Image (cartoon, helix red, strand yellow):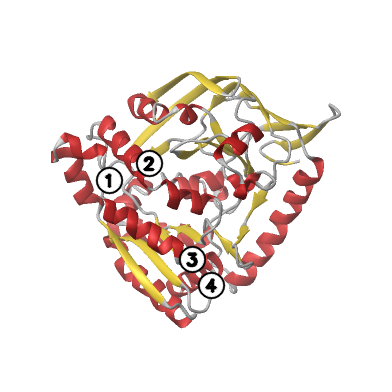
Amino acid sequence: MDKMEKYADLLVRVGINIQENQTLVIASPIECADFARLAAKKAYEAGAREVVMRWLDEQSQHQKYIMANDEIFDEFPDWTVQYFNHYADQDAAFLSIAASDPELMKDVDPKRLARANKAGSIALEYYRSRMMSNKNVWCVASIPTVSWAKKVFPGVSEEQAVENLWEAIYKSVRVDQENPVEAWREHQRTLNEKLEFLNTNKFTALRYKNALGTDVVVELPEGHIWFGGGDEAPQGHVFVANMPTEEVFTMPKLDGVNGTIVASMPLNYNGNLIENFKFELKDGLIVSFDAAKGKDVLEELLNTDEGARRLGEVALVPYDSPISNQKILFYNTLFDENASCHFALGKAYPTCIKGGEDMTKDDLKNAGANDSLTHVDFMVGTKDLEIIGITESGSEIPVFKNGNFA
């Protein structure tokens, strides 16, 4: 079995962990069609009932954002809503291949992008809530496209850039190892040790500091739960929602974040790069922000709704990891967030608080969980990041030292 086949097999059997007679929906850029078909074959071989293909074309999307009538960016087709809700209600699994050109949309009016995102998020609220509560199995992974590879490796030929990106991805997802499935089991055991430490200590807050300027206290709600690696499906089997993944994560208290957060990497958002940005937060709310590049795009993101100006996720990732050690800026959040501690703007995962997957919106808010139409990760980890955990009794325990778990 070659590496590409091993990778497709890993996504189906470990990422999605497809069950006998289960439907799989694959969303793939048309440039990744060969790999998507290979993943479909692996799913059928593993017992899938049906594989449904959803082809994406970002070049056509770009054309639409530039040339279409303005009013359509506040609309979202009913048939698309029915498509997602239908398969979600069938307990289908969803595999998404994320491989966008990091700067394709830089000449698009950011207001159009923001409006289209908001319309889609409102229309697909039922589907999104099922995904974020793990009512359906889902996995996000990536494979190279020429435009993405050239951005990551600009000084070489297209062919070499794609080959380099393949090798970087294989290393990140442990496909370069002899037995990737066993390598993932070992990785999960390592993550479980971190989860046990964090869930046992039940920190009430984390204090972050680094030389870049991050100096922030992040309160954690009572009953919060740390997760990492595999998640549990309603039927009881384990799936891995992100491949790669190096993080352990939970939710911050929606009104309990105070201080300065400085991003340590650019953020690829909607085909635009936001660079050298920072936030000032008071009582959980972003009260001011700045960016050296893409500030208008960042502003549109923060204007999505009130929840977009609060944090919905706090994630810990060691600086010393298979992704970070490659010293590659991927311009792809799936990879960059797993090379760095990060936060997310917007909606919190309901599963990160005890009983949260069955709570109403009001119950979640009262428990300290942020709600929003968006959820966007951004990176804050550095080689010198220090994180102190504060317990209920006021004791301070080192969690991170010099960028890694203490």
The percent coordinates of residue 78 (x first, y second) are 28, 51
CA neighbours of label 2 inside 10 A, class few (<14), some (14 to 19), many (20+): some
Judged left or right of residue 30, residue 389 is right
Q: Residue tagged by mark 3?
A: 91
Judged left or right of residue 391, residue 171 is left
The percent coordinates of residue 350 (x first, y second) are 59, 45
The percent coordinates of residue 318 (x first, y second) are 64, 45
Question: Residue at the spot x=52%, y=55% of the render?
Answer: 242
Q: Please say whether residue 82 is visible from this viewpoint.
A: yes
Judged left or right of residue 289, residue 82 is left
Distance of mark 3 from mark 2, alpha carbons? 21 Å
Q: Please say whether residue 247 is visible from this viewpoint.
A: no
Instruction: Indicate which label's residue lies in the foreground, 2 or 4.
Output: 2
SS for callout 3: loop
| Residue 13 badge | 4
| Residue 122 badge | 2
